[in-house]
């Protein structure tokens, strides 16, 4: 039930609303609305109950195992929340003078330094407010670099076919043509195809390493050499940074620019659309183009570096300086872990993934890349189950919900049919990994006995199987009173 | 097993091509392709009049699982697009070989000989 449906004309939540009326004056008449907005009119208790009930229906990392591949749904330590919400930080106005913001700015400066160190890049800007914006900033900097050199013949960005869909979209948003590079059957980039695609028209390549196939690109150094020789730059999509945190650095692999999803790797709460944080790190040659503002220091005081200090910057990406609350949580997380802790993140996230992969293979499930070691995530294909039992990956996914687990990513990457992309993260205990494997075996057994039962799942949730086809064909996102009354 | 009519030509990227006998061809996606994609929810059509080269992306079919490019199997100009699909993408699921997406006037009719026949396409579809 929507909160609008609880609404009764004239009902109010008085405790929250002082009974004063502000006089608005000076607003031109044509900008004033004639009708009051259709807001729900409910009592305070109704509002509390409504949202509490909704929260109880949530599938979340606080309530369930959530192995959603490439999303890195790890535990969000409570300390990060409480420290980021200290009154002094919460109360700081984004436009407060630098002298009033030294504490916040010192934390942000240190976060920049930590991210530089852990990625091996020369400089970092925290400005991008999400992964997609970080990607955009990254390719915009590559474009600015070529433009500044008068090198305007570069029109293409290479993107492996295993990439996240945001990569080609980013290239196109920055005015480039995305050119797809095929992947070989072992999961690595097809080097021959790469060589054939490289040329004076190549602006750069966008790579995720480990890739979305859950394997580490073994020829990354050679790829970096070839792309650089062709005059292009390398962009690192930080989606899978969790697997290599503190162990391997994109800067050392030869990347020129990287975006990081702090809401994944640095454990800030995410899902449901954010807020995220997508800082970018760059090599020396891209440093002048960083998005502003960046926190600088003269050793004593911290300052915002703006257009005056970074005249070649690609500019400002938001009204202020990124998602401050998210950045603070990531800062606390990084400080709590320290260098050694970050290595443990990589160690245990890959150990957990490899344990699950091995156990699922032993149980007879088919790995998409059986000869490869998994990174922090891996792919199984339910092609055989779909064919022999008539129960596909989506049916397994829905039935997992009845077992109290969020489904892994389904049908992505597109290269693998009927696939699950499974990412357990380092924060899960062995018992939850085992429970997932057990659930998979149970569902397969159930499919053998009674395929229809699995195809009808879920049974135990507030809603049954949703008609996602109808939802996509007949988009209807706005509540309208006429509709509900009819 | 999916339906692969004998009288059509195919591509590795799962388009079918029907020779209309007047220098034009109709192009759609195979039964196997629509099975892999699942229920289609959106089709982005090429522009009538657009000039295509073989292998170039010219349309998009989108299902709840994935958005997939459709490639032109041949060189030529788009003479007609199937506007109906904009409102009824499910036609491709229901009758993939009736639901043509666009028609092309061939620049070089001999290109048809380079396309796959039903038997060759069957081998590819089975490998998937």
Image: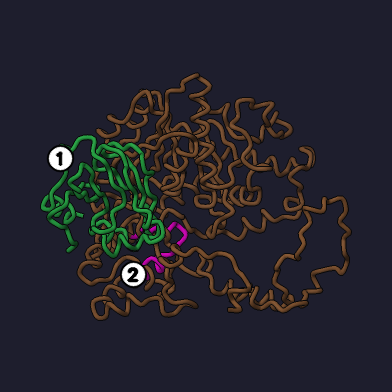
Chain colours: A brown, B green
In the rendered structure, does residue A425 fall within the stretch colored magenta?
Answer: yes
Residue assigned mark 1: B114
Outermost residue on the left side: it is B119
Q: Is residue A415 above or below residue A143?
A: below
| Residue at the image position 37 percent from the left and 55 percent from the top | B66
Quadrant that contains the N terminus of chain A: bottom right
Residue A434 x, y percent position in the rendering: 36, 68
For the question of whether residue A210 can be seen, the reply is no
Judged from the image, the secondary structure of the residue bearing numbered disc 2 is helix
Q: Nearer the viewer, residue B10 or A394?
A: B10
- Badge 2 crowding class, 10 Å Cα cut-off, few under 14, some 14 to 19, many 20 or more, is many
Residue A412 x, y percent position in the rendering: 36, 55
Residue B122 x, y percent position in the rendering: 14, 54
Residue segment shown in magenta: A420-438
The image quadrant that residue A48 belongs to is: bottom right
Relative horizontal placement of residue A136, taking residue A454 as reference (left or right): right
Q: Nearer the viewer, residue B34 or A76?
A: B34
For the question of whether residue A14 can be seen, the reply is yes
Quadrant that contains the C terminus of chain A: bottom right
Residue A125 x, y percent position in the rendering: 59, 37
Outermost residue on the front side: it is B22
The disc at residue A189 is: none
| Residue at the image position 23 percent from the left and 58 percent from the top | B97
Residue assigned mark 2: A396
The chain to which mark 2 is attached is A
The reply to whether label 1 and label 2 mark residues of one chain is: no
């Amino acid at each position: 039930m929507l909160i609008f449906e609880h609404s009764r004309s004239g009902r109010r939540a008085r405790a929250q609303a002082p009974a004063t009326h502000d006089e608005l004056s000076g607003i031109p008449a044509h900008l004033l609305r004639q009708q009051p907005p259709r807001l729900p009119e409910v009592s305070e208790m109704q509002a509390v109950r409504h949202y509490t009930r909704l929260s109880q229906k949530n599938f979340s990392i606080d309530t369930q195992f959530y192995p959603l591949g490439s999303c890195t749904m790890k535990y969000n330590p409570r300390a990060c929340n409480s420290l980021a919400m200290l009154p002094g930080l919460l109360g700081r106005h984004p436009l407060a003078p630098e002298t009033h913001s030294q504490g916040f700015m010192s934390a942000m400066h240190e976060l920049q330094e930590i991210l530089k160190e852990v990625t091996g890049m020369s400089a970092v800007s925290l400005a991008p407010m999400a992964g997609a914006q970080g990607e955009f900033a990254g390719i915009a900097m590559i474009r600015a670099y070529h433009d500044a050199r008068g090198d305007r013949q570069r029109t293409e960005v290479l993107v492996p076919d295993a990439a996240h869909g945001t990569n080609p979209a980013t290239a196109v948003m920055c005015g480039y043509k995305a050119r797809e590079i095929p992947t070989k059957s072992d999961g690595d980039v097809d080097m021959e195809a790469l060589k054939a695609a490289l040329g004076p028209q190549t602006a750069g390549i966008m790579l995720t390493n480990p890739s979305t196939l859950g394997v580490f690109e073994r020829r990354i150094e050679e790829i970096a050499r070839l792309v650089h020789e062709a005059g292009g730059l390398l962009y690192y999509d930080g989606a899978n940074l969790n697997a290599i945190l503190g162990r391997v650095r994109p800067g050392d692999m030869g990347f020129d620019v990287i975006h990081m999803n702090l809401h994944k790797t640095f454990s800030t709460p995410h899902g449901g659309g954010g807020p995220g944080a997508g800082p970018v790190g760059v090599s020396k040659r891209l440093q002048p183009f960083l998005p502003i503002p960046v926190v600088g220091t003269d050793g004593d005081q911290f300052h915002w570096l703006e257009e005056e200090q970074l005249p070649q910057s690609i500019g400002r990406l938001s009204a202020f300086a990124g998602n401050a609350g998210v950045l603070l949580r990531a800062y606390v997380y990084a400080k709590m872990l320290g260098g050694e802790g970050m290595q443990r993140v990589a160690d245990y996230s890959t150990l957990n993934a490899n344990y699950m992969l091995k156990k699922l293979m032993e149980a007879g499930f088919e790995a998409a890349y059986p000869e490869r070691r998994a990174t922090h995530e891996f792919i199984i294909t339910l092609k055989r189950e779909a064919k022999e039992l008539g129960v596909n990956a989506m049916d397994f996914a829905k039935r997992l919900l009845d077992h109290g687990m969020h489904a892994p990513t389904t049908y992505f990457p597109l290269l693998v049919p009927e696939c699950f992309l499974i990412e357990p993260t380092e924060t899960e205990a062995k018992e939850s990994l085992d429970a997932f494997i057990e659930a998979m075996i149970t569902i397969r057994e159930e499919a053998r006995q009674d395929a229809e039962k699995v195809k009808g799942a879920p049974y135990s949730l507030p809603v049954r199987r949703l008609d996602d086809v109808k939802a996509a064909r007949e988009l209807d996102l706005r509540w309208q009173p006429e509709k509900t009354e009819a | 097993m999916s339906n692969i009519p004998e009288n059509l030509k195919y591509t590795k990227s799962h388009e079918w091509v029907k020779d209309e006998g007047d220098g034009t061809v109709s192009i759609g996606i195979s039964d196997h392709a629509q099975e892999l994609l699942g229920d289609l929810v959106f089709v982005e059509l090429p522009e009538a009049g657009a000039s295509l080269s073989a292998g170039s992306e010219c349309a998009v079919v989108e299902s709840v699982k994935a958005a997939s490019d459709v490639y032109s199997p041949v060189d030529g100009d788009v003479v007609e697009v199937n506007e109906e699909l904009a409102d009824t993408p499910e036609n491709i699921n229901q009758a993939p070989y009736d639901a043509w997406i666009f028609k092309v006037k061939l620049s070089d009719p001999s290109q048809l000989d380079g396309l796959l026949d039903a038997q060759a396409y069957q081998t590819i579809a089975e490998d998937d």
